[in-house]
Amino acid sequence: MTVILNEGDSAGTTGAASGSPVDAAPEPGKAMTRGRLVLIRFARNKLALVGLVLIVAMYLMAFVGPFLTKWSYDQQDYTAFLEPPYSEHIFGTDKIGTDMFALTMRGLQKSLIIGLLVALISTTVAAIVGAAAGYFLGVADKALMWVVDLLLVLPSFLIIAILSPWFRGKSWFLLVLMLAAFQWMITARIVRGMTLTLKEREFVKAAKFMGQPARKIIAKHIVPNMASLLIIDATINVGSAVLAETGLSYFGFGVQSPDVSLGTLIGLNAESATTFPWLFLFPAGFLVVFVLAVNWVGDGLRDALDPTSTRVRRKEKKDTKEKAA
Amino acid sequence: MTTSELQFDTPADRVVEGPVLQVDDLHVSFPSEAGRVRAVRGLSYHVSPGEVLGIVGESGSGKSVSSLAVMGLLPNSARITGSIKFQGRELIGQSDTELSRIRGRRISMVFQDPLSALTPVYTVGDQIAEAILVHRKVSKSAAAKRAVELLDLVGIPNAAERAKAFPHEFSGGMRQRAVIAMAIANDPDLIIADEPTTALDVTVQAQVLQLLETAQEVTGAGIVIITHDLGVVAGFADRLMVMYAGRAVEKGKVDDIYQQPRMPYTLGLLGSIPRLDVSEKQALVPIKGNPPSLTDLPPGCPFAPRCPMVVDACHTAEPPLVDVDGSLEHAAACIRTNEIAAADGEGAEAAVEIFGAEVADEPEVAKIPREQREVVLELDQLVKEYPVNKGVVFKRRVGTVHAVAGISFDVREGETLGLVGESGCGKTTTLMEILGLQKPMGGEISVLGTNVSDVDNKRRFEIRRDMSVVFQDPMASLDPRLTINDCIAEPMQVHGYSKDEINRRVPELMRLVGLRPEQLSRYPGEFSGGQRQRIGIARALALEPKLVVLDEPVSALDVSIQAGVINLLEELKSKLGLAYLFVAHDLSVVRHIADRVAVMYLGKIIEIGEVDSVFEAPRHPYTQALLSAIPIPDPVKERQRERIILTGDLPSPANPPSGCRFRTRCFLHAQLPPEKQRQCIEVEPPREVQAPDHEAACHFAQIRQVL
């Protein structure tokens, strides 16, 4: 309800007046850099830390796991078809006798890399293109927005499908690039719009008048002020990249057998979900945990970067109260 | 328009018995995350018919909330107790439908922001007609006719035509007139005006205040005017109530309060206003600290933490509002009223004495004659025009906006030049041209002797070191994502200072502007407006500039906080020998801080000179009108003053009048014989020397005292 209190004359007094305990600096008098402050704020968010630990653990598992089992994803055990989990095959086997643990780990490797990289690349491209177009305007804006519009009208699925014979056998990184190339356009447009309004803010003008070069203004003032949007966008992109890869794989493009991804595993075994649940539950469970962990980290990052976020502070208040008691 | 058509009762017809509005022990509180916000805590006042009550206080003192409570416009989450009696009828506890019958008919309201008070998709005439139709059984055509009459009454020219216009086609002042027309449409008995002039220019402010006076005469209504500026109400209000932390801390007749304030807060408010009519440097009283949080107030006087006269007894109990000086009309809530009464001075002088404010010393360089000092900034016939384009595919130029039409001035070391004028006169464009350091469209800009038209980017970057800027809006001028440390360090990083040097200098700058270096790792959002403006000043001073450009640095701040920032600016100027280019629309602030002043009108400087000479003996009719429009916080002087009210609004800079640009609004021009008028229409007046260091651009310049 403070809105109403300050409505008419919002000039003088807010924030500090309430005298809330704010980020207590560990060494009073010495100022902290932005990076450290964000780190401290991030570390305060328990859920985000759990998410981070989960992601790291999954990476470790995906790349170290295959060495812990004697089975490999392209190798069959002809003594065990469709066996539920037991000591020999801890995740069970599928109908041709492949070890599910080995398969899931191999799929996890692919999906982790594709999901995170695609999200990272597409959001970065969106931020750079959108901010540059909005900041410089003129020819740069026209050219960049023309590219965005062009990519938006191109049927991305068809193009990847047509190109896929060409990058068959080549590095998986090409697939990542292709997926990222078709995911950044809408965000870039939103970013451009936000840049247009941010550009008129006085702190951007102040930076300009003190001689800050344009690229630094974009990096230091414009992009951080859109961090919430970009982080949310990136976390959504992780999920949609995994799904896009699944769709492609399903139609025979993208990741090809005998290689697997979580997407192909889920697609392949979805119909066995009720009859032979281990075929479906393990890959699907990993995917869910992965996307969830990414979301938690994203939330934590957003709160840590956003100084107006009250979540971090409110929790801290409770902590200090407990300590006092 | 005949009187019979205007359905106003004459004041004499009314049955006058008791006050129109009687508020007793009003409490309003809101739920919030930090606990209940007790916005109004035991407020009592009354308004008699035909009386003007001024409610004064800082932001968050509960003045708006209390009047919204009267209107019944508070959200449902608000808890309201006490009694609000309108013409003897209790309003608290009535349903919204019942209140709707009173609202708009018997009580009406004028809001601060005239743009948001009108619906953008209906014509102004329709909106006024709607206000009538809601409450009276009249035909649509009769209502429309009356809307036109009302617009005419509030001084809108061509009312019949303008009634068909949409709100965005009206200027700010005209919109506020339309809102007032709506407010008096049903001949109310009470008008509540919530900061009706805060969003407006000074010249328009004078027009609106006069209009409110007219409205009061026509309707005979009681008026409650809410403001944070003691100057506005001095000549208008009959009685005054000063609010602090949700309570009235002093109330009484206007003259009593201005001359014998008995509560330190009122004293502080009075002392914090720069006076237009005082030539020698007067000390401004800043009230330290911020208003208290209204969630859990400590026991005792809520003003105690900021009070210079605080004693231990102040912390024990909240003082009640008691009559002072043996007068029934004048009451104050302070345990030391007698001691304030014993102070020597009156009003603002007593404030200076009690608060111990000091005038900053003159800078060293000021002792050298002006001509011998270094020229820091020089503009010569600067021109900036914007094209007006039409068409979607093939853009063709249909006109030109002459935002700045050839202005010249210089700023020398250690001096302050105030640049004043109404909004839209080209002040900001001039600033942006100076700060942009690009080759201007016409004319020349020289900074520290270097002409910016013929320098390369490297030199331009070097010039930026000597020139910095402080913006108007302290909320927008600091990046919310950067800590204060990073904000202040930024200019030094850009200009290649070493890390150690930055780490040493940032806390130093914080101390210089009166903030604690321990707060460096906080974000701007955790500071109040005044503190943020100080941070902006610290950032501007980081590179030890010679010239600081100030774009209305105090106009977004409360008066009490404004005084602190002005004092800081003066102190820094004398300490560091800075030169300021101070852009403002508030002439009293300019008088206080500036050494020279330049008055702009429609992209031209029409009068420039030494500040006392311009203010005491203004030569140009526009300067005279501007000066006479500024209220003086002294009720006696204010009532005697003759106001020059300018008619109409600023003409469009896309199509300025021929000859003298001011002639369309000039009162002097209107009185001239036709042959002399022709000279105004045909010949553009040149800037001529009128007195030592005083130039004005008027064919018929003559001195007129307006203060």
Image (tube, coloured by chain):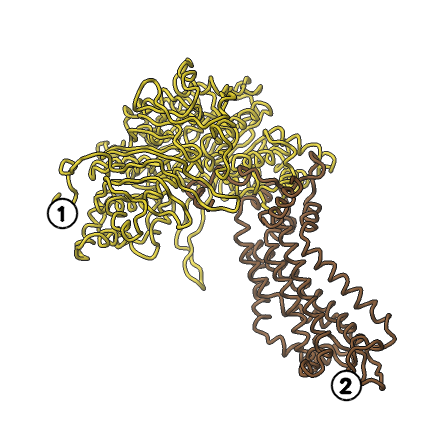
Name which quarter of the figure residue A86 lies in.
bottom right
Report the side of B388 relative to A238 (left or right): left
Label at residue B5: 1
Q: Indicate whether B626 appears above or below A223.
A: above
Name which quarter of the figure residue B420 lies in.
top left
Label 1 and label 2 in one chain: no
Q: Which residue is mark 2?
A: A95
Q: Indicate whether B521 appears above or below A92.
A: above
Query: Chain A in the picture: what colour?
Result: brown
Q: Position of residue B11 (x, y in %)?
A: 16, 37
Q: Amino acid at mark 1?
A: Glu
Number of numbered labels in the structure image: 2
Provide the letter of the chain coloured yellow: B
Q: Chain of mark 2?
A: A
Q: Residue at x 72, y 34 (%)?
A: B501
Q: Residues within 10 Å of mark 1 (few under 14, many from 20)?
A: few
Label at residue A150: none
**Residue B602 in view (yes/no):** no
Quick check: marks 1 and 2 in contact, CB under 8 Å? Answer: no
Q: Position of residue B623 (x, y in %)?
A: 36, 30
> Which residue of the protein is positioned furthest toward the right in this rendering?
A70
Quadrant, the C terminus of chain B: top left
Mark pair 1, 2: CA separation: 95 Å
Q: Amino acid at mark 2?
A: Lys
**Residue A187 in view (yes/no):** yes
Q: Chain of mark 1?
A: B
